[in-house]
């Protein structure tokens, strides 16, 4: 399968714990995005990388959230001191980003439940 | 506030009925437009996209969408739906001056009755 993959698919954690999610984009895509989706809503943009550089961050991304893409390939999203309000589906997407090729390809998501 | 709206939260149709799902956005200037579909238990998949040129774009599985700039709309259509079209449909807008940020609408759930 050459699509975007995410691990884990589900994560249950207790409030106050740290969690880390991984995203592996489509191999030739140099752009990688993180979104958050809650029930009944569309995905909300969190952050974006071009290669290893983090170029955009939403105001939704509080200082408890950090994302990295160390070698311009896979990316990790870490949430520190989780809160119940962090419970959501975290989606990763990737794209070529060239003119006419802006569409983003999404992974299956990581569902986070904070108890 | 700048946003993307989708007219219907839940649409219920019988097989062979025609479908039109509304999408409106409030960004001025140039926009890139997309419709994504999420089948039950699956990830978001691209249905179709509009960047420029012919405002009527065709996508996969018989779907099409029309960009009407004066109405800030990008409605999705299909002449005859099938039970397998049951899914959640999301409109997404990438304003040209927004970098790589996609703004998604809240989604419309489509239920097709056999």
Image (cartoon, helix red, strand yellow):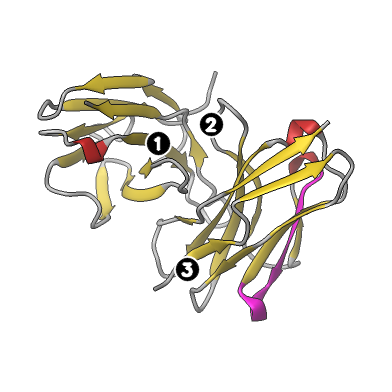
Q: Which residues are magenta?
A: B62-72
Identify residue for label 3. B96
The magenta stretch spans residue B68: yes
Q: State the image quarter where residue B69 is shown.
A: bottom right
Q: Is residue B53 above or below residue B58?
A: below
Return the chain for callout 3: B
- Is A74 left or right of B69, judged from the image as shown? left
Mark 2 neighbour density, 10 Å: few (under 14) some (14–19) many (20 or more): some
Contact, mark 1 vs mark 2 (Cβ under 8 Å): yes
Return the chain for callout 2: B
Identify residue for label 1. A91
Q: State the image quarter where residue A33 is shown.
A: top left
To the question of a shared chain for discs 1 and 2, the answer is no
Contact, mark 3 vs mark 1 (Cβ under 8 Å): no
The magenta stretch spans residue A42: no
Return the chain for callout 1: A
Mark 1 neighbour density, 10 Å: few (under 14) some (14–19) many (20 or more): many
- Is A102 left or right of A83, judged from the image as shown? right
Identify residue for label 2. B43
Q: Position of residue A111 (x, y in %)?
A: 36, 27
Mark pair 3, 1: CA separation: 23 Å
Q: Secondary structure at mark 1?
A: strand
């Amino acid at each position: 399968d050459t699509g975007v993959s995410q691990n884990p698919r589900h994560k249950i954690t207790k409030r106050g714990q740290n969690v880390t999610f991984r995203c592996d984009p489509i191999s030739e895509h140099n752009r990688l995005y993180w979104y958050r989706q809650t029930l009944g809503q569309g995905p909300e943009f969190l952050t974006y990388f071009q290669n290893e550089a983090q170029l955009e961050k939403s105001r939704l991304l509080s200082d408890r959230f950090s994302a990295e893409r160390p070698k311009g390939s896979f990316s990790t999203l870490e949430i520190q001191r989780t809160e119940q309000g962090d419970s959501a589906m975290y989606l990763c997407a990737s794209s070529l980003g060239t003119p006419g090729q802006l569409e983003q390809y999404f992974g299956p998501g990581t569902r986070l439940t904070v108890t | 506030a700048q946003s993307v709206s989708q007219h219907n939260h839940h649409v219920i149709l019988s097989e062979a009925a025609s479908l039109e799902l509304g999408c409106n956005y409030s960004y001025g200037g140039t926009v890139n437009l997309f419709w994504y579909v999420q089948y039950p238990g699956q990830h978001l998949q691209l249905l179709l996209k509009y960047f420029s040129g012919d405002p009527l774009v065709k996508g996969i599985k018989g779907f099409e969408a029309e960009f009407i700039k004066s109405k800030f709309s990008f409605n999705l259509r299909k002449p005859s739906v099938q039970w397998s079209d049951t899914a959640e449909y999301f409109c997404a807008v990438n304003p040209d001056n927004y970098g790589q940020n996609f703004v998604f609408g809240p989604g419309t759930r489509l239920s097709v009755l056999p």
